[in-house]
Image: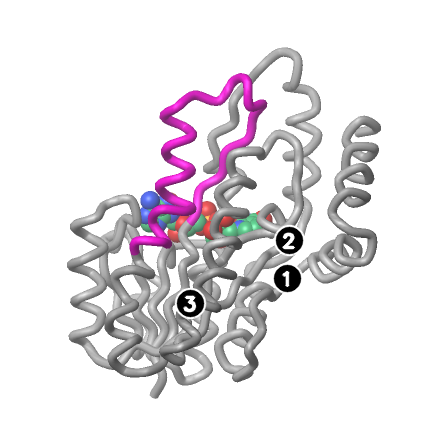
Amino acid sequence: MKTIFITGASSGIGKATAKLFQAKGWKVVATMRTPEKETELTALDNVIILPLDVTKDDQIQSTVQSAISLGDIDVVLNNAGHGLFGPVEAVNEQQILKQVNTNFLGPLKIIQAFIPYFREKKGGLFINTTSMAGLTGFPLSNVYNATKWALEGLSECLSIELSMFGIGVKTVSPDATKTNLFTSADVVSHPLYDNVIQKMIGGIQQSGESIDIAEVIFIAATDGKDTLRYPAGGKAQQIYARRLEIGPEASRIETTKWFLGL
Ligand SMILES: NC(=O)c1ccc[n+]([C@@H]2O[C@H](COP(=O)([O-])OP(=O)(O)OC[C@H]3O[C@@H](n4cnc5c(N)ncnc54)[C@H](OP(=O)(O)O)[C@@H]3O)[C@@H](O)[C@H]2O)c1
């Protein structure tokens, strides 16, 4: 039986992925900040719930060690994430640090904690949930995008660096999906930008389902291919293909025209 370790499994894409892998016969180590609140995953066979706030260094170490001691881990899914919307001129340092710590440093530290284990067993796969925001630039989710670009960049570097140990690294980049991400996001108000922020967030909420992303994560975990990037859900494939087709500069200009006409 294969095992996946998932961060941020309490809701949305993480929970859908935990349920899908369990249904496909995998053992799931589902980690979350508040395990005491979980009722759905606790009722499933072969699902182990462990506490993990990805911004807490001590907990990363203890939970990764607990997970390893429970049995073999095949796939680590860095899924936990937090949203921030607002103009760069208005976001404060605390909000920026929360983004960086949750969306970038957390996954990086979890990867660091698992590398020696994967190196020793000469295998293993890291899948990092990034975003279309990690492959393209959007206005007003600037710092969020920056953390996802950072995670994309880290993943590409690591996919090369860890290849000598037989360790895989992939990213799954969802298009906008109906989850708690937008309702729990920090939205920073500024009179000159508020109208356009509300239009953007309103548009984003009418979008795809977590299970669509979970299915792409399952493909990434099981296809045996040396592919780095898996755009997932909604129009992710088309958006990414368009960017590759016209190049990043033309893509940026196209997005700017859309934004100015929003
Ligand atoms: N929804 C989208 O449109 C979309 C698009 C592209 C990428 N993504 C990415 O997909 C991933 C999953 O997000 P989602 O859309 O499924 O949203 P979600 O339902 O809000 O799930 C986010 C998960 O991350 C957890 N989390 C937040 N901060 C954490 C921390 N410090 N430590 C541990 N867990 C933490 C949340 O836990 P709590 O329940 O404790 O808050 C929750 O389980 C994120 O990385 C997000 O950036 C989402």
Query: What residue is shown at x 64% (from left), y 34% (from top)?
Result: 201
> Is residue 3 at least partly visible in the picture?
yes
Marks 3/2: CA–CA distance:
28 Å
Q: Which residue does the numbered mark 2 point to in the structure image?
A: 175
Specify start and end residues of the magenta stretch as a single range. 81-109
For mark 1, does the 10 Å Cα neighbourhood hold few (<14), some (14 to 19), or many (20 or more) residues?
many
Query: What residue is shown at x 56% (from left), y 68% (from top)?
Result: 228
Q: Which of the two residues, 245 or 67, is positioned nearer the viewer here?
A: 245
* Label 3 or label 1, whichever comes before in sequence order: 3
Query: Where residue 93 sits: x, y (%)?
Result: 39, 23
The kind of secondary structure element at disc 3 is helix
On the rendered structure, is 236 left or right of 56?
A: right
Query: Where residue 19 sits: x, y (%)?
Result: 43, 70
Q: Which residue does the numbered mark 1 point to in the structure image?
A: 231
Marks 2/1: CA–CA distance:
7 Å
> Is residue 178 at least partly visible in the picture?
no
Query: Where residue 31 sits: x, y (%)?
Result: 30, 60
Q: Which of the two residues, 135 or 79, is positioned nearer the viewer here?
A: 135
